[in-house]
Amino acid sequence: MSRPDPAHAHDTGARHQTHHPHHLSPARLLGVDPLLDDPGTRIVVCCGSGGVGKTTTAAALGLRAAERGRKVVVLTIDPARRLAQSMGIDSLDNTPRRVKGVEGDGELHAMMLDMKRTFDEIVEAHADPERAAAILNNPFYQSLSAGFAGTQEYMAMEKLGQLRARDEWDLIVVDTPPSRSALDFLDAPKRLGSFLDGRLIRLLTAPAKLGGRAGMKFLNVGMSMMTGTLGKLLGGQLLKDVQTFVSAMDTTFGGFRTRADATYKLLQAPGTAFLVVAAPERDALREAAYFVERLAAEDMPLSGLVLNRVHGSGADRLSAERALAAAENLEEPRIVDQEGGKAVLRNSPDTYGSSESPASEAPAPDEGSPAALDTERTDGERTIDELTAGLLRLHADRMQLLSREQRTRDRFTALHPEVAVAEVAALPGDVHDLAGLRDIGNRLAALRPELPEAPGAGG
Amino acid sequence: MSRFQVVSGKGGTGKTTVAAALALALATEGKRTLLVEVEGRQGIAQLFEAEALPYEERKIAVAPGGGEVYALAIDPELALLDYLQMFYKLGGAGRALKKLGAIDFATTIAPGLRDVLLTGKACEAVRRKDRSGRFVYDYVVMDAPPTGRITRFLNVNDEVAGLAKIGPIHNQAQAVMRVLKSAETAVHLVTLLEEMPVQETADGIAELRGARLPVGRIIVNMVRPEVLDAADLELVRAVERSSVARSLSAAGLGGARRGQNAERLVDPLLQQAEEYAERYGLEHEQRAALSELGLPMHELPLLAEGMDLAGLYELAGELREQGLS
């Protein structure tokens, strides 16, 4: 791969003391239950690239925490309709709704972010009615609040801050927006803050504050050129709309930066746990590695990686190669039969399970030559043979998938040995109801026994 | 065949791969395609096993038959400066704007403006002609934002044209929308045979149609091979465990008696077949749901060895065979 591994930059840092170029240490196990049960955990943030089951993970964690006795609210950004339905809520609106059917003493509430509504509420809460109306009717505001992507990130952070401030829940689980660049939601408040404090906003608001062109002489030449340029670019009316909007924002959002800073600090605080969600695929894990590095750089507390849709096999002692060879053995005699010959199987007697398989026991003493080696197969047996060959090919596919997933995971573990991992076994279908979410929760919390815990790994 | 091919799809469905394969497939003999990336992930460079792409159109591959694929990763900030320079000769003013934070504002704080720049740049490449009046690129393929954002992304210029009612921005926005809403453009949606991506595809198509944007084809990606058919699956439910054990034993996988190696494989293998059957049923439902959407549909196979450069050419070959180029 041509991309330089970002983790190499870390290898020299104090954060990563160990590097195993040849020997892969097993991943640390992420204990989901201790995390959810700890009353000190107040916020769980699920981040990850699109299509890895982030929203489902957030909902499953919320349900599990609630059924283990906590009072939980799940803030989702853009759930699939089915997922909303799985929590028994047809239209998630901008207020938390209690989810019915939760077992135990805890409570689960769920809400979906309505970013326009959230934006409007901020304006209404922080401006007098007249000014609020002026902002809400400003065409530039209307586009910014509803039409443009990215506002989601600011509003998600704002909503998280609000929920936390209400202090009605002892755990908030947040699903992050499917941003194009991974951690936009971390950058958003800072960016907006620095924009509101910046020179541009002073420039844009200056003419309005100073009373139009008469005030321009107070500006230096460069600035007046800028206003002229912007006017030329944007058109006079739009510039006026933007200026009105910005000056209204300036007063309304006086406290925004303070709140944004507070939310950012909240994310860094010990009560917050970040979970990076990924699937065992190259692209998803590459994004996950990027998340891990960004979170470390921002001093955000990472609890671990949730690896969704991991495949297993009850017959993993049988390799893909051997399964394919056996399938061919079963299919070949049929061709021989058609030529009038006798079905002769060319494989040698049982060697399976003796040397090549690590999990093998001593072969059973009476395992002699395979059945029906020299006898002609009946039609019925041939049908079964065809089916069995299909089963073996299916198994070969599964084993190839397994080893691909394993390689991808090992690569991540080698780059980030410090990150604890919770693997979630793949489901054949989709999640439709609370039972499905509960099942995912069980899979999340099941520590996979074949991965021994590394020394010094915490729970 | 539309000259501007926009490839969208739910996250995780492999739209970057499909966009790259499509760019290769369209680069038949003597043709030149431009593959455009807008999300700053450098996914194209990784697929083609090349160095990270700068903000510059450069040749990244030669297609079978001799066509050429160029690639461009659009950087919104550079695109804005480019744009200011091209239309308004504002080189110095551009730097001043940058100092003021206006460029940062335009490209990050107001992501809508970023989308204006990205679509504007792509449409510029679509319309660009050389001195002899021929199009510089026969096709432009865009690895676009995901289904959930695609309509808003493509429609952003409509909104801008509504906000800026006169002036150069208004004119530019309208010119972009003229390309996007014409037969020159086709928006393809990549999906998997799974419930959520299929649902999102249906929603996305409705949204695109509502915005009068031209919907192209549905491309079903990572289709798993049919290992067992419906008859096999019926047999799986009825089959005697012992006869499967004997068959496994005949194939050389150990003894068929209880506790012996072949016999111990039966349960896990049948379990895997059951999981396969469940997925098989779901996939059939999803395929039926997709065909109800009334669009041309194409299927690309799941590559057993994972995605690499050779696999990309294989998928491009598939797309050509299926008549996408």
Image (cartoon, coloured by chain):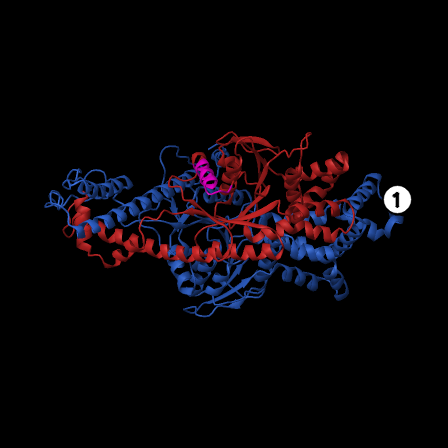
Chain colours: A blue, B red
What residue is at 27 percent from the left and 48 percent from the top?
A: A390
Above or below, B301 against A270 in this view is above
Q: Is residue B113 visible?
A: no
Q: Is residue A111 left or right of residue A399?
A: right
Q: Which residues are magenta?
A: B311-324
Q: Is residue A204 left or right of residue A383?
A: right
- The mark total stands at 1
Residue lying farthest to the right in this orientation: A214
Percent position (x, y) of residue A166?
58, 64
Percent position (x, y) of residue A274?
49, 51
Seen from the viewer's position, the closer of residues A196 and A365 is A365
Q: Is residue A4 visible?
A: yes
Q: Residue B125's quadrant in the figure?
A: top right
Helix, strand, or loop for circle 1?
helix
What residue is at 68 percent from the left and 49 percent from the top?
A: B157
Percent position (x, y) of residue B52?
55, 33
Which amino acid type is shown beneath numbered disc 1? Lys
Above or below, A173 against B79 in this view is below
The chain letter for the residue carrying disc 1 is A
Q: Please rate how many residues cluster around mark 1, counting C-alpha atoms within 10 Å: few if below 14, some from 14 to 19, many from 20.
A: few
Percent position (x, y) of residue A200?
75, 45
Provide the residue designation for mark 1. A217
Task: Find out whether residue A362 is within the magenta segment.
Answer: no
Q: Residue A78's quadrant in the figure?
A: bottom right
